[in-house]
Image (cartoon, rainbow, N blue to C red):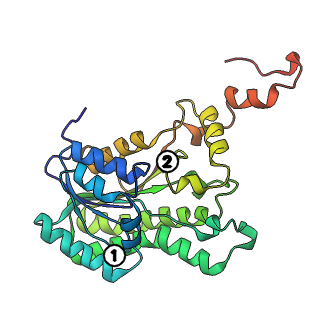
Amino acid sequence: MAHDLLNGKKGIIFGALDNRSIAWKVAEMAHQEGARFVLTNTPAAIRMGDIHQLAMKCGNADIIPADGTQVKDLEYLFREAMKRMGGKVDFILHSIGMSMNVRKKRAYSDVDYDFFAKTLDISAISLHKILQTAFKLDAIHEGGSVVSLSYIAAQRTLYGYNDMADAKALLESITRSFGYIYGREKKVRINTISQSPTLTTAGSGVKGMQDLMDFTERMSPLGNADADECAGFCIVLFSDISRKITMQNIFHDGGFSSMGMSLRAMSMYSRSLDCEDCPPVD
């Protein structure tokens, strides 16, 4: 049910590939909430993905190809987006991430450093490039909002997440550092959402993803947050409801980040114990 939270607002959504993408869900919900926006991804991703279908569903939204790691592409994107939409934007979603070390199954103790550099550039430094370009072009309205997607591996070690953990840590640091500058100078908010493990196209490439999702579901009092729920939270952060929230990494994970051990998770390890050793039920 729509509430017109983004009525009259304009934005840019990075990273929609197919209907499993969180960015795709955000675009659908932003359209329902009254926003107008440009969809963008790399030229290769636009050719391979279903973004044209998404654009049609969202009122024939404009698609402007841009590589988030290339400043010239970003300069063109912002100038063209402002031209087509008649002015500055109000919100930006950064949903960009990729690791060749993960794709090639290189262990963290044996990463390819060229791949590592690309991981950081694509998954984190791209946010800095987007923010710096927007800042120099004065492309975001006062009171605007930028949201990027993170993960708890920025704070805790998770098997198989590899160099993406370093990228997420850098992403959150950029959010704080640029959030101070953008807030002070332009009153623009910058936040990250630390989402539950989610079976997106990118997420499905993480080793042991299904097992991880089962574990976090058992650990989280509210269960895992899915892509639609994450999209809803993005909309709230884009809206005027959250005008004083900035420089934050907000956990959207059903409570997983505050847990040590849950009864449901412990039960998986206690099945072979004698009844007298079983944990109490609370």
Q: Please tell me the numbered disc located at residue 241.
A: none
Q: Which residue is mark 1?
A: 132
Q: Is residue 244 visible?
A: no
Q: Residue at x 19, y 73 (%)?
A: 80
Is there a contact, CB below 8 Å, between mark 2 and mark 1? Answer: no
Identify the image quadrant of residue 185.
Answer: bottom left
241 and 79: which one is in front?
79
Q: Please tell me the numbered disc located at residue 195.
A: 2
| For discs 2 and 1, the disc positioned in front in the rendered view | 2
Secondary structure under the numbered disc 1 in the rendered image:
helix
- Is 23 left or right of 187, judged from the image as shown? right
Note whether 222 is above or below 95 in the view shown: above
Q: Count the marks: how many?
A: 2
133 and 173: which one is in front?
133
Percent from the top left, x then y, of residue 137? 22, 77
Quarter of the image with the C terminus is: top right
As shown in the figure, which amino acid type bears the numbered disc 2? Gln
37 and 55: which one is in front?
55
Quarter of the image with the N terminus is: top left
